[in-house]
Amino acid sequence: MTSIIAAIAYLVLAPLVGGLISGIDRKITARMQGRVGPPILQPFYDVAKLFEKEDVTVTPSQNTFILSYLVFMALTGALFFAGEDLLLVIFAFTLAHVFIVLGAYAAFSPYSYIGAERELISLMAYEPMIILTAVGFYLVTGSFYVGDIAASQAPAILYLPGVFVGFLTILTIKLRKSPFDISTSHHAHQELVKGLTTEFSGATLGKIEIAHWYETVVLLGIVYLFFGFNPLLALVAIAVTYVLEIFIDNTFSRMKWQTTLKSGWGAAAILGFLNLVVLYYFYLGV
Amino acid sequence: MAYLKKSPWLLHYDASSCNGCDIEVLACLTPLYDVERFGIINTGNPKHADVFVITGGINEMNRQVVKNIYAQIPDPKVVVAVGVCATSGGVFRECYNIAGGVDQVIPVDVYVPGCAARPESIIDGIVTALGILEEKRTKMKEQEGSA
């Protein structure tokens, strides 16, 4: 019963929390650049505006794909907060991204084609690490269920420092931050017009934005799992992690897609894999 | 609701400017003026834009380009002609290759004079354009309601 309530609470609250995080992100970014910055509620104004605009659709199927992206992203988070299997969460998460890529491919445009291809590359780059993260949690807590992992008293971060740093690397890819914002990026950055989202406008673009808010909350939820033994410490860790991501975003320029692939796989192969090997041989789990 | 006024996204196009006005447009984004505090973002994509900012007079080579970009911006949209060349052709008005101001090709809503236009007057012009944008949205909604 509590799991259903948690899932519903996520569906209702995640867009609000995600939007606020995005607003704070833009404010901190502006301050780092010596600007005043937009109001904290700016992301909500942006999305509300997008729903007021004219509906310009290149191909009708693209709207279906984007709706599926939003639905599956919401489902990913609902499964996560209901305490379901982490592997299932990751599969739903990947499926959601397959839909946005299909949507971009459906919209016959060179910009959205390149954006879609780059999104596939970043999908390839982060997928191994995210699966190793799930395996790491299993080795430490003996369960793939998010509910069990979150309730576990084992200090996951102490056993999985490499996995955590590896996860931070792919978090930068997932949050579309420089240097890994190759397919499309936030704020006033421009690349390949707008990459993946070039052909989406109005309400469809609004849905992509909302889906991204859902996504942000799930990703920060995974950060929570590393510190699940102490909820207060976990919240502090989430805040520090996010500010660190903003700092990285403002420090680096965008790099080539090869760097994204190398960083994602490098993190998985070196930090993630070695951490798991050490854990497997010296620690037999709870 | 009037969310459009709180989140206008700009598309900047240099028709055939000497770059003077372009630099002033970009100056609006710097920490000194920081137009993002009004929610204004400089997008590179006409499909995400609400305000079309043009600098420089229209020449025969980019007449079609400007029309094409204008057509790609979803309604409601406004056009702001920045600098004296964009408003009337300026000193290039009589040139063999210049069609004149932006209003020779697409409807212009706000004219920002100056050579080069100062960032203050550009921001003023865009804020004026936001009022027009809101009017257009109301009109669009009424038409939708009656249709």
Image: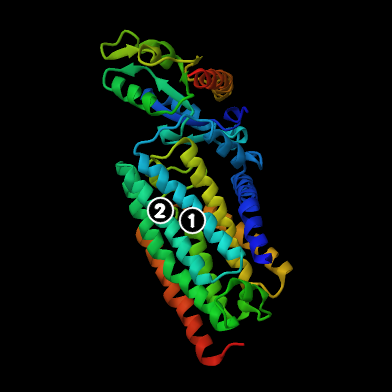
Q: CA distance from mark 2 to mark 1?
A: 9 Å
Please tell me how crowded label 1 is: few (under 14), some (14-19), or many (20+) other residues with Cα within 10 Å: many
Residue A202, relative to residue A238: is it above or below? Answer: above
Q: Is residue A272 above or below residue B105?
A: below
Rendering colour mode: rainbow
Which quadrant does the N terminus of chain B fall into?
Answer: top right
Q: Which mark is residue B73?
A: none
Q: Which residue is mark 1?
A: A72
Is residue B96 toward the left or the right of residue A60 in the image?
left
Q: Is residue A191 visible?
A: no
Label 1's element?
Answer: helix
- What residue lies at 54% left-to-right and 55% top-to-bottom? A74
Residue type of the residue flagged with mark 1: Phe
B124 in relation to A131, above or below: above
Look at the numbered discs 2 and 1 and tell me whether their residues touch, using CB distance below 8 Å: yes
On the picture, is A65 further left or further right than A186? left
Percent coordinates x, y for residue B9 in the rendering: 51, 32
What residue sits 56% from the left and 54% below the top?
A214
Q: To which residue does mark 2 refer?
A: A99
For the residue labelled by badge 2, is the local secondary structure a helix, a strand or a loop? helix
Give the side of residue A245 with respect to residue B97, left or right.
right
